[in-house]
Image (cartoon, rainbow, N blue to C red):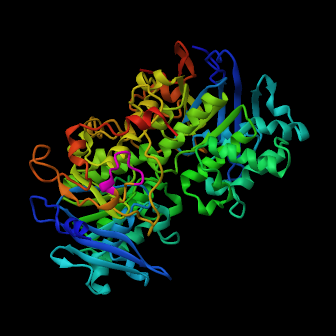
Amino acid sequence: MTEAPVTPALAPPAAPVVEVRDLVKSYRVRGGRGLAVRALDGVSLAVGDRSTYGLVGESGCGKTTLGRLLLRLERPDSGQITFDGQDWLAKRGERLRVARKDIQAVFQDPLGSLDPRRTAGYAIGEALRAHGLAAGKGGREQRAAELLAQVGLAPELARRHPGELSGGQRQRVTIARAIAVQPKFVVCDEATSALDVSVQAQIINLLIDLQESLGVSYLFISHSLAAVRHVADRVGVMYLGRIVEEATAGRIFTAPQHPYTRALLAAAPVPDPAAARKGLPAGHLGGEVPSATSLPSGCRFRLRCPRAEAICAAQEPPLAELADGHAVACHFPG
Amino acid sequence: MANEKAGIERTVTSPEPPALSLRGLTVSYRAPDRELELITGVSLDIGPGEIVCLVGESGSGKTLTGRAVLGLLRRNPRMRVGGSVTFGGRELTTLPEGKLRRIRGGQIGMIFQDPAAALDPVIRVGDQIAEAIAAHGAAAGKRAIRDRMVELLSQVGITDPELRARQFPHELSGGMCQRVLIAIALAGDPSLLIADEPTTALDVTIQAQVLDLLATLRAERGLSILLITHDMGIAAQMADRVVVMYAGALAEVAPVTAFFARPGHPYSLGLVQAVPRADAPRGRRLPAIPGSVPEAGMRPPGCPFQTRCPLRLDLCEQEAPPLEAAAARHDATGRHLVACHRSAELLDGRLSVWSAITAGTS
């Protein structure tokens, strides 16, 4: 086992498009007399070219903060982000503006990320114009129509305002806008969470199709391990600002090692009465996520952990590699 | 329409007299230019101690059905509720508002999706529970009400109830707020709980705790629960019977095991198969139902699902299929009801509906 918990335990994928190392980001608590919350407390991960990294955890675990740092919406307190071999945090001014097209985002609420007064076609055209990707109004309109077709929408929908589109159609428009600028990387933050199950399936399929046709990589942030199952190549599970387990999707789902990962899997209801009722309610975690302002000593999961022993209160377990690319931060994995 | 009539008159019976009974429930909305039928004749019984999960996509009418049962649509002068809702031998649709208010929050408890919004932010949670006890509960006198309040808080799994009672909603987590709302719902010692997406706003591990609590309340108090959810996983875990709604009408009603073993309606099958599953074999694409729920008043002629259905026949465009019991060879109890012209073929396993869609996604 390594001593320092913040260094990555894993060799990064052969050609990572994005690599983050020891990212730390804290926020001052309002009215907290200088109290700070470490939303990210030393997170490292790498996303391979043309692949999808699924980042899973409950609210407040830091997964959205990580996405915001990658999008350069905020700066970390410390740590590095490398994008396409370059120092992503060093980019500023005009260089940053140009580079922004390489990392795009799709968020949970498409209504919140589209201007209600502008048509779908305008939203896509604006993205093209900002990065000089299609010449003239006519050129932009034609390209917008192509992009709409690419995300499975009729070109006529370009004339509609967000309020005239269904939730699924709106999310397709934000995806069309994201891919309009030919990004290498897209941060999908709960991109399918607010959608009905049938529409969620459509969007998941669309993201998979676009990855195959465009070669884009995704950071797929979700509270749902099940949704991640269908898109991710690698999966990281976060708890209170740290990654507690990371492995290939296959291993996370078939051989989870961290008790928190196991609990997340057990808590997700599956559409099968026999499986859903098995082991209930013993498999469910008690308690709630503690406040990030008052972390317990040692392992931050120990207060909810069925396996916790004395060492868990004394020492924080490092994220250590168990087997081929499978790392877990637990004194008693398995 | 003749077929809709048949659907209305056919009732869903449980072995014991039902706790709640809907017969031909309709809800319509008076728009400036026309009358929109939002719910078109829903008939359904919920037995004592039974958990019925009402499922469907947003816009299918499941929340509206719950609100119609509770008489909450009366406040909107444009809404009209028809048909019958009987609870404890009383017809609720014609009951004066004053009497209905005593039942609502009393013998019928209710909880909703957003627990923080349902609590008053400036009143201590203990006082909010006490208020419900005073209004509906059996306890009288300050002391008795207080004891009952603390008892309710511990029943819903809140540790340190004395301390929590003195806190304000913003000092509690979302999961704890939902427990407080369940305590308020229990204050009137209800026999029926209507829970509309009670865990949708909660994290998955907290959702599991709240669902466990609901299952325990049913087991210990014989509470009947109408659980409205968009999550087929929750339905599989919680329901005795599953009721699928589409475009304001019932598409299928079935005991939970039969339902998930072999749904008789292509819409039900689509809903079940579209769910991402952590235990799925490593197949990436999900079978997705194309399109989306028709907007209110835009229901197509014939079967409401025909515009999205991969099994559509000419008949489906002309005639709405009635909600009928599946043939005895599929279900001898008569408790599996389907509104589909092709349900017999589906239940026979002669049709593979979504494989075509899975292969070529759009």
Left-right relation of B100 to B48: right
Evaluate whether residue A214 shows in this view: yes
Q: Is residue A82 above or below residue B286?
A: above
Q: Is B309 one of the magenta-colored residues?
A: yes
Q: Please name the predominant secondary structure of the magenta segment in the image.
A: loop
Q: x, y (%) of residue B300?
A: 40, 62
Q: x, y (%) of residue B144?
A: 27, 72
Evaluate whether residue B105 shows in this view: no
Q: Is B113 one of the magenta-colored residues?
A: no
Which region of the structure is painted magenta?
A: B307-316
The foreground one among B132 and A10 is: A10
Quadrant in which the N terminus of chain A is drawn: top right
Q: Image point 50% across, 50% down: which residue?
A: A195
Q: Image point 46% across, 21% down: which residue?
A: A251
Q: Is residue B142 above or below residue A172?
A: below
Left-right relation of A230 to A130: left
Q: x, y (%) of residue A317?
A: 54, 24
